Image (cartoon, helix red, strand yellow):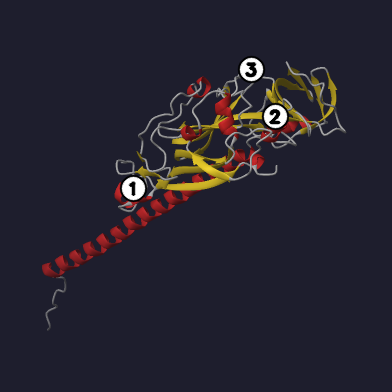
Amino acid sequence: MFRTRQAGMSLIELMIALVIGLILMLGITQVFIASHSASRLSEGVARAQESGRFALDFLERDIRMAGHMGCVNDQAHFIKGMNSPKNNLTAATGSGSPLDFSVAIQGYEAPNTGPTSTLAVGQGAVPAALPAAIGGLNPAPVAGSDILVLRFLAPEGVPVTAISGQELTLKSGGGSRLTQGGVATPTLFGIANCESADVFAGTLAAGKITGTTVDFTRYAPQPEPTQVYRAESMVYYIGQGTNGPGLRRARANSAGVYAINEELVDGIENLQFMYAQDTTPAITGATPPVGNMTVQNVASGVTTATTAAGAAEWRRVGMVQVGLVARSAERTGTNADSRPADAAARLGVLGMTYNQDGATDGRYRTAYEVSVALRNRLFGN
């Protein structure tokens, strides 16, 4: 009779199997970690790119409109010398007041952020000598970023069907055009035909606008080409939002206060501008602009004067270069695996080096630049 032999694994075989299993598990874990890190980085890149594109879209659209005054732009009105566009609001020319519609575009330069400069993440200073209205913004502008002010009449106007004293009757249903884009109760308006333009304070109710301290006698209702617009005085800047710094746009009311402040795009960390000026050194009726943008400066290089002479320098601006830094919403990894080793030297914004060496948040950052021509300053308009 044969004795049944007991089968099994030896201790050495068991140890070898455990080692092989551990190696396989380690490999699977490493693959999972690498895949997860790549996924986070890919998502961070996508979010940063999305934020950058949205921010540029907002900026381009409004920059192009600077100086829009209906049929005839502000620069052409000025050259004609017919006291138009007339600003019926109290604001000194060139002062930086939100109500100074004699200046369609105006900028404020953060110190040491021009070409050839280097700015470290989270460092820098707020532009100096800011007007009180901008200095009082809440949330406040962050350090190291430029500030841009734009003034114009909104793209869509409403035909005026009747004028009685200081009261304008609008085309039926047209009043809704004046409350679009987040301004439910507008108080700043512009009226224009193809000869004159006035900016004034007023109230909108029941399809009528009642102006204050404005003379409408030089305008005639339809069929004359008389239209009324919402007047826009806005400031673009970087301020703290729901998820750190973001691109913000604040709109002024007739009291000269930036009453509507909205975060347009989060994840925008830095904003820089440069301005191209017409070759003509002093734009007048005798010396109109020639349309050649041969002078380029940061805002402080255009002028820091808050006078009529300063306004004249800003009137020469016909193109704006925009540069911004967008960052991912969340950490995408360690600083080392979020960017190449020499990224600090390669991430530039309009000639300024944006140094990430001191950043410890592990976020992905990328820079975008675009040149925007002011549609209402193009030669021949």
Asked if residue 243 shows in the view, the reply is: no
Seen in the image, is 378 located left or right of residue 268?
Answer: right
Asked if residue 320 shows in the view, the reply is: yes
Q: Which residue is at the far front?
A: 286
Q: Position of residue 15 (x, y in %)?
A: 15, 65
CA neighbours of label 1 inside 10 A, class few (<14), some (14 to 19), many (20+):
some
Give the residue at x 61% y 38%: 62
In front: mark 3 or mark 1? 3
Real-space CA distance between mark 3 and mark 1, rounded to the nearest whole angstrom: 47 Å
Callout 3 amino acid? Thr
Q: Which residue is mark 2?
A: 230
Callout 1 amino acid? Ala
**What secondary structure is found at the residue carrying circle 3?**
loop
Residue 320, quarter of picture: top right
Q: Which residue is mark 3?
A: 90
Q: Position of residue 379 (x, y in %)?
A: 66, 44
Callout 2 amino acid? Arg
Quadrant containing the C terminus in the rendered view: top right
Q: Position of residue 178 (x, y in %)?
A: 71, 30
Seen in the image, is 54 located left or right of residue 2?
Answer: right
Real-space CA distance between mark 3 and mark 2, rounded to the nearest whole angstrom: 18 Å
Label 1 close to label 2 by CB (< 8 Å) = no
Seen in the image, is 163 located left or right of residue 2?
Answer: right
Give the residue at x 35% y 53%: 37
Q: Position of residue 360 (x, y in %)?
A: 31, 41
Q: Which residue is mark 1?
A: 344
Q: Is residue 352 above or below residue 145?
A: below
Q: Choose between 356 and 360: the one closer to the eye.
A: 356
Query: Of callouts 1 and 2, which one flags the residue occurring earlier in the amino acid sequence?
Result: 2
**What secondary structure is found at the residue carrying circle 1?**
helix
